[in-house]
Image: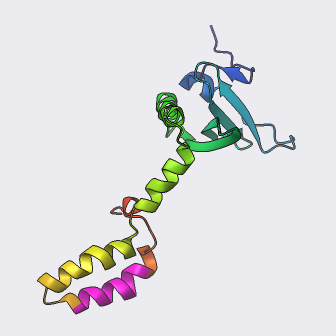
C-alpha cells in the first residue's frame, strides 16, 4: 500500500503527511500554500514554492486576528509545534497576548554590550589589574561584532 498525500487543506498533521506535501505551485500568484491541523485548532503550516515548510499559530486577541511564526519543519516537530500553540492558548486564556509576552521576554534579555557595561566591567574594575585592557578589547573588538546580540544568541563556534 502506497502513501497518498492528503490534498485537503485541513488534515491531521503527522510527520509523514507533512513530508508528503508537494511544494507550492510555482505558477501560482501566491507565495505559499497554507494548511491547517485538523486536530489542533490554530496550528497552521505554510509550504513555499521551494518546498520549505513553516509552522505558525493563528489566533484572535481582543477581536483582532494575529499570527505568530513558530519555526521551520522538521527542526520543529509536529509535537513541539502543538506544545507551543498549547502554551500560547494558556496565555490567551489568561488574557495575555502571546506575541507581547515573547516580545517582553526578548526586551528583558540583555545584549552583550549591556551585559559588559552593567555586570562584567564593574566586576573587572573591582577585581582585575588589567581592567583597562578588558575595557578596550570589549569596546574596540567585541562590541562592534557581537555587542547588539542577545546573550542567548551567542555560542561558541
134 part of magenta stretch: yes
Q: Nearer the viewer, residue 2 or 99?
A: 99
136 part of magenta stretch: yes
Mark yes or no: residue 66 visible.
yes
| Residue at image location 37% in from the left, 79% down from the top | 142
Q: Could you say where residue 37 lies in the image, as x and y percent from the top left?
A: 63, 24
Quarter in which the C terminus is drawn? bottom left
| Residue at image location 70% in from the left, 22% down from the top | 10
Q: Quadrant of residue 128?
A: bottom left
Q: Main secondary structure of the magenta part?
A: helix
Instruction: Tell whether 82 sits left or right of 54.
Output: left
Mark yes or no: residue 21 visible.
no
Quarter in which the N terminus is drawn? top right
Q: How is the image coloured?
A: rainbow
Q: Could you say where residue 59 lies in the image, as x and y percent from the top left?
A: 64, 35
Q: Which residues are magenta?
A: 132-143
| Residue at image location 81% in from the left, 37% down from the top | 25
| Residue at image location 45% in from the left, 81% down from the top | 144
Q: Could you say where residue 129 lies in the image, as x and y percent from the top left?
A: 13, 90
Q: Taking 112 as reference, is 156 above or below it?
A: above
Q: Nearer the viewer, residue 131 or 65?
A: 65
Q: Taking 118 as reference, is 80 above or below it?
A: above
Instruction: Tell whether 137 sits left or right of 42.
Output: left
Q: Nearer the viewer, residue 17 or 126?
A: 126
Q: Could you say where residue 146 lies in the image, as x and y percent from the top left?
A: 42, 73
Amino acid at each position: 500500500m502506497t502513501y497518498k498525500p492528503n490534498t485537503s487543506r485541513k488534515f491531521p498533521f503527522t510527520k509523514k503527511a507533512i513530508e508528503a506535501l508537494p511544494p507550492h505551485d510555482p505558477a501560482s500568484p501566491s507565495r505559499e500554500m497554507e494548511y491547517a491541523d485538523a486536530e489542533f485548532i490554530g496550528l497552521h503550516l505554510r509550504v513555499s514554492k521551494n518546498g520549505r515548510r513553516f509552522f505558525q499559530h493563528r489566533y484572535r486577541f481582543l477581536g483582532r486576528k494575529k499570527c505568530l511564526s513558530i519555526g521551520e519543519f522538521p527542526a520543529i516537530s509536529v509535537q513541539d509545534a502543538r506544545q507551543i500553540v498549547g502554551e500560547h492558548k494558556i496565555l490567551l486564556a489568561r488574557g495575555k497576548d502571546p506575541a507581547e509576552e515573547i516580545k517582553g521576554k526578548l526586551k528583558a534579555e540583555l545584549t552583550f554590550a549591556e551585559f559588559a557595561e552593567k555586570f562584567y566591567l564593574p566586576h573587572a574594575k573591582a577585581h582585575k589589574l588589567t581592567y583597562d585592557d578588558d575595557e578596550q578589547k570589549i569596546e574596540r573588538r567585541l562590541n562592534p561584532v557581537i555587542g547588539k546580540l542577545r546573550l542567548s544568541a551567542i555560542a561558541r563556534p
